Amino acid sequence: MILILLAAITFCTSVLSGIFGMAGGMILLAALMTLLPVATAIAVQGVVQLIANGSRAIFSREFIDWRILGAILMGLVAAATLLFIVRYTPDFVTVCIVVGLMPILVWIPKDWLALDASKPWHGFWCGFFGSGLNLAVGVAGPTIDIFFIRTQMDRRTVIATKAAAQVMSHGAKIIFYGAIASAMAPGDWIIALIAAPFAVLGTNVGYRILQRLSDENFRKWTRWIVTGIGLFYLSRGVWALAG
């Protein structure tokens, strides 16, 4: 029953990510953390999300902006190096509170924080902070989104480039937690393997829905969905912190 439930959650969250480019990974991680230790949950979610984002990047490969992707990669390498040096290890409360506070970023007025991933240095910081948070707490959708939502790119280019960036980020996450992944129980790998095809299927469905969505509705619904998920994470983290 647990595997069937996780397969259904993986499909639904992949549909959500296929439409909005994020939010799905946040829900999937919350589900996995109820079953697995935090670090193992992040590793399993990294495998599933790598496949989901990889399929999304393939479906929309003609829209990927490779110049932006290169700048994000450099930021990712810098963030991974820093986390490796300090020997960072995640814990449940930190993950929940940090993820819960992320949606604040999507409500910051455009004039306050004019970030644009199409600018080289902005792309670098997108990789550093966005991918760095992905390594640290497992998800970073809103952090990456603030670098894209204010660009002049249409929704398809945004989704495609973010998907490719997330492929790099989740790949780095799997490598970063390699020691944990190698120590995962067989049941943990079964979860990842069963969820993988549902991630691809859900991504395909979400991509088709995206084609029917306007740019205006795309940006509006992204904010509200991520905010709702963030409130759930924040309340969960505060509850755990209170003992």
Image (cartoon, rainbow, N blue to C red):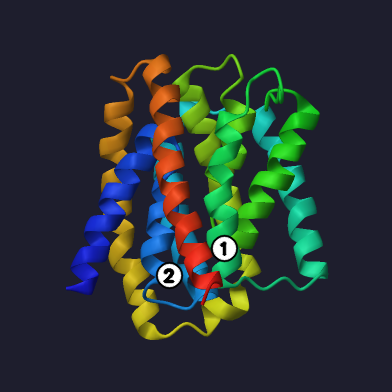
Residue for point 38% across, 28% down: 221
As drawn, 14 above or below 238:
above
Image coords of residue 98 (percent x, y): 60, 55
**Residue 170 in the image: x percent, y percent?**
55, 55
- The quadrant in which residue 115 appears is top right
Image quarter where the N terminus lies is: bottom left
Type of residue at label 1? Val
In the structure shown, which secondary structural element does the residue marked by tag 1 occupy? helix
Gap between marks 1 and 2, in whole Å? 10 Å
Q: Is residue 98 left or right of residue 111?
A: left
State the mark number for residue 108: none
Is residue 131 something one can see in this rendering? yes
Residue visible at 28% across and 66% down in the picture: 194
Indicate which disc, 1 or 2, sits on the residue closer to the N terminus: 2
Q: Which residue is mark 1?
A: 95
At 47% from the left edge and 31% from the top edge, which residue is drawn? 159
Relative depth, front residue between 61 and 72: 72
Q: Position of residue 147 (x, y in %)?
A: 64, 30
Q: Residue at x 51, y 77 (%)?
A: 243
The answer to which of 28 and 180 lies nearer the viewer is 28
Number of other residues with Cα within 10 Å of mark 1, as a class: few under 14, some 14 to 19, many 20 or more: many
Q: Residue furthest front?
A: 242
Q: Which mark is residue 33?
A: 2
Circle 2: residue type: Met
> Mark 1 and 2 residues: CB-CB less than 8 Å, in contact?
yes
